[in-house]
Amino acid sequence: MAQQPFIVGNWKMNGTRPLLAEARAIDRGAGRRSGVRVALAPPFTLVMAMAEALGEVAVGGQDCHAAPSGAHTGDVSAPMLVDAGAQFVILGHSERRADHGETDEQVRAKADAAIEAGLSIIVCVGETEAQRDAGDAEGVVAAQLEGSLPAALPEGASELTVAYEPVWAIGTGRVPAVADVSAMHARIRQELVTRYGEAGADVAILYGGSVNAANAAELLAVPEVGGALVGGASLTADSFLAIVLAAGADQD
Ligand code: PGA
């Protein structure tokens, strides 16, 4: 990994204030691993409290609306996330795409809005099991990138992270073969360089889907895997810090 590994916890729709104790413990642990960048994306209701409580770990949202404000009941805008202390936002997660019918076009509009508001973005892509079985995985992901990513990165590579998350690996305990992760990450890199030129070579590409303490080291050692987007295993400091430790192992 050329840059510092980036380990992001996605709490999804989990956690009320008592879980901030885990976030604080993660923050303390992350402070002892200076070679690893660590971030957490709690539900909206915890963003402000978590951002106020943590020092080492960046705090972000799991989605935002494409408009800055307006008549959109139940939605949260990118400037609101910034106001709550968020530094980044996850966009286009497969659960958003599946549960809310989010299209690539909508994800791109959100991406543009988030960057405009000063957030960095983590854009998620990944194929379903049927698409992989049909031999379409790389084509599907390339099309998602084409449709979902912002046209330009005005402030450079640090504005964007891509997370490759095969839908069939999320929350299932199944992970792709290392060779498949490697091939997909190489393809994503190629797409990023084609799109953004030199900046595309520096965009971090995370792997996500059933990452845990036992498989993290192997996955993070794959070329072009710049870190991990972690769901279930990010909910406790013990399991999440074990992944952070695995990411930092080659720094010592
Ligand atoms: P998981 O979720 O680690 O629980 O598989 C990953 C994700 O959806 O980001």
Image: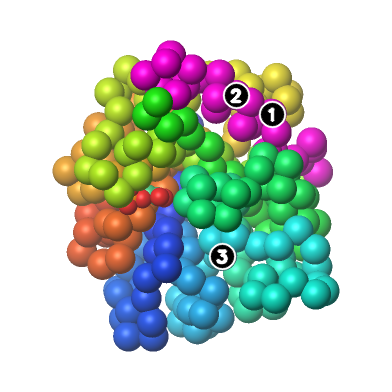
Distance between the alpha carbons at the discs numbered 3 and 1: 23 Å
Q: Give the mark toward the camera: 3 or 1.
A: 1
Q: Residue 197, relative to residue 7: is it above or below?
A: above
Q: Which amino acid does label 2 sit on?
A: Ala
Question: Disc 1 residue type?
Answer: Glu
Kindly tell me whether mark 3's CB lies below 8 Å from ligand 1: no
Circle nearer the viewer, 2 or 3: 2
Quadrant in which the N terminus is drawn: top left
| In front of the other: 136 or 229 | 136
Q: Do the residues labelled 2 and 1 touch (CB within 8 Å)?
A: yes
Residue carrying label 3: 61
Residue at the (40%, 58%) spot, across then down: 9
Q: Give the range drawn in magenta.
A: 131-154
Locate residue 221: give its quadrant: top left
Find residue 142 and name its label. Answer: 2
Residue appearing at x 27%, y 23% in the figure: 177
- Residue matched to label 1: 146
